[in-house]
Image (cartoon, grey):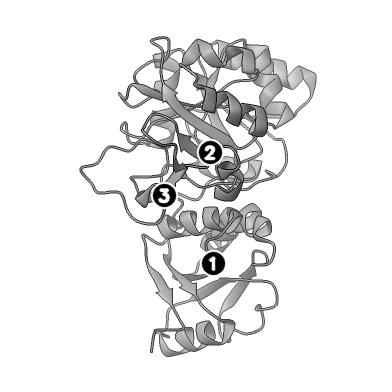
């Protein structure tokens, strides 16, 4: 796997690889994406093979200019209103697809997920290619998403289906894009992200929130968006989410010591509270954007520390913190403890 920079020369190498049907990990403002030509089934298939991604998990198509929006789907007035306010940026919209989008991209659905990233490197690569890119997170399926090039290298260095990674530094948002479906009676949030429910309702006052945002999708129900159906974002160690005060979280961990090597991913100011545990600080609940930026990096750091159990402190699921909570639910396989209530 080649390591490329963001220089003009290296971005040309990247686009040439993509034009030749290869896959390349590229930076976006959300997470690193494993990109391939979204219009070529053979190229997209390499994404699934590289990640070990289930075929029923749809991909997001990335474009570089609003003028190409209608080439791949049937945008509504609501879609254009969202695009005007939030694009380029971390928002994905789901709309009825056009036939140019292969079935493998949409997991056989008659809809397609589309977004326009704000990361200048991602936009430049798409422009250089002249076609849209399918680009799910550039990690092994089910593992924490990569927010730094070194995360991609750790997961994909010897993967025969990945040709290169473009090192664009750490990702700004740190969690995947917000996903909104515009195909039902009312707009529906399927996956929270940096664009919050509150912001979306300024454009879509009748927005609903899918039950799958905060609970597991039934096995027999088809996933309409990435990150819904399968266990996601999970480290190797057993992971438990802890909601509640610092004091109650400390008490819970003390009462449930079982001799296993334990790491606590905690808030700023809590790092000295958990005795006999390694701690990793990932941000402040008063600044939920810091939690989003660092959550996947913290999960990866906990895993490489060799711990056998991970506790993660959770902030109330509001605003950007809803996106973090959603990812941690799936990382812990929905193992969430309210330490204020547990005795």
- Mark 2 Cα-neighbour bin, 10 Å: few <14, some 14–19, many ≥20: some
Give the answer, above or below, for where 69 lies relative to 283: above
Outermost residue toward the front? 205
Quadrant, the C terminus: bottom left
Give the answer, above or below, for where 118 lies relative to 288: above
At 60% from the left and 28% from the top, the residue drawn is 81
Outermost residue toward the left? 220
Residue 60 location in percent, x, y?
48, 29
Mark nearest the camera among 1 and 3 is 1
Residue 11 visible in the current orientation: yes
Residue 134 visible in the current orientation: no
* Secondary element type, mark 3: loop
At 27% from the left and 37% from the top, the residue drawn is 222
Mark nearest the camera among 2 and 1 is 2
**In the drawing, what numbered circle is on residue 204?**
2
Query: What's the CA distance linking mark 1 and mark 3?
Result: 20 Å
Residue receiving disc 3: 232
- Mark 1 Cα-neighbour bin, 10 Å: few <14, some 14–19, many ≥20: some
At 58% from the left and 13% from the top, the residue drawn is 68
Give the answer, above or below, for where 288 lies relative to 112: below
Q: Earlier in the sequence, mark 2 or mark 1?
A: 2
* Labels 1 and 3 touching (C-beta < 8 A): no
Residue 275 location in percent, x, y?
58, 87
Residue receiving disc 1: 316
Q: Earlier in the sequence, mark 3 or mark 2?
A: 2
Query: What's the CA distance linking mark 3 and mark 2?
Result: 28 Å
* Secondary element type, mark 2: loop
Q: Earlier in the sequence, mark 1 or mark 3?
A: 3
At 54% from the left and 59% from the top, the residue drawn is 299
Query: What's the CA distance linking mark 2 and mark 1?
Result: 23 Å
């Amino acid at each position: 796997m080649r390591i490329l920079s963001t220089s003009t020369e290296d971005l040309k190498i990247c686009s040439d690889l993509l034009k030749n049907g290869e896959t390349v990990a590229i930076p976006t403002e959300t997470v690193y994406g494993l990109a391939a030509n979204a219009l070529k089934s053979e190229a997209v298939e390499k994404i699934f093979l590289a990640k070990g991604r289930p075929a029923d998990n749809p991909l997001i198509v990335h474009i570089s200019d609003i003028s190409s929006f209608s080439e791949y789907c049937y945008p509504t007035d609501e879609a254009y209103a969202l695009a005007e306010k939030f694009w380029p940026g971390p928002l994905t919209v789901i709309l009825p697809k056009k036939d140019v989008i292969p079935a493998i991209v949409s997991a056989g659905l008659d809809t397609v997920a589309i977004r326009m990233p704000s990361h200048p490197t991602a936009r430049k690569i798409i422009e250089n290619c002249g076609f849209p890119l399918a680009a799910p997170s550039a990690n092994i399926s089910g593992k924490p998403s990569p927010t730094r090039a070194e995360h991609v290298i750790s997961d994909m260095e010897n993967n025969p289906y990945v040709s290169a990674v473009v090192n664009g530094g750490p990702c700004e948002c740190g969690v995947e894009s917000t996903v909104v479906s515009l195909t039902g009676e009312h707009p529906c949030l399927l996956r929270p992200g940096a664009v919050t429910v509150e912001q979306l309702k300024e454009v879509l006052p009748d927005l609903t929130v899918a039950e799958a945002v905060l609970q597991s999708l039934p096995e027999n129900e088809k996933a309409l968006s990435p990150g819904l159906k399968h266990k996601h974002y999970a480290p190797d160690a057993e992971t438990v989410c802890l909601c509640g005060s610092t004091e109650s979280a400390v008490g819970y961990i003390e009462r449930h010591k079982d001799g296993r090597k334990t790491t606590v991913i905690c808030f700023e100011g809590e790092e000295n509270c958990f005795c006999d545990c390694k701690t990793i600080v990932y941000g402040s609940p008063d600044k939920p954007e810091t939690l989003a930026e660092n959550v996947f990096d913290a999960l990866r750091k906990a895993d490489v520390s060799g711990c056998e159990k991970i506790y993660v402190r959770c902030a109330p699921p509001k605003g950007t913190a809803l996106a973090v909570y959603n990812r941690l639910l799936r990382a812990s396989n929905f193992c969430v403890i309210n330490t204020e209530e547990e005795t």
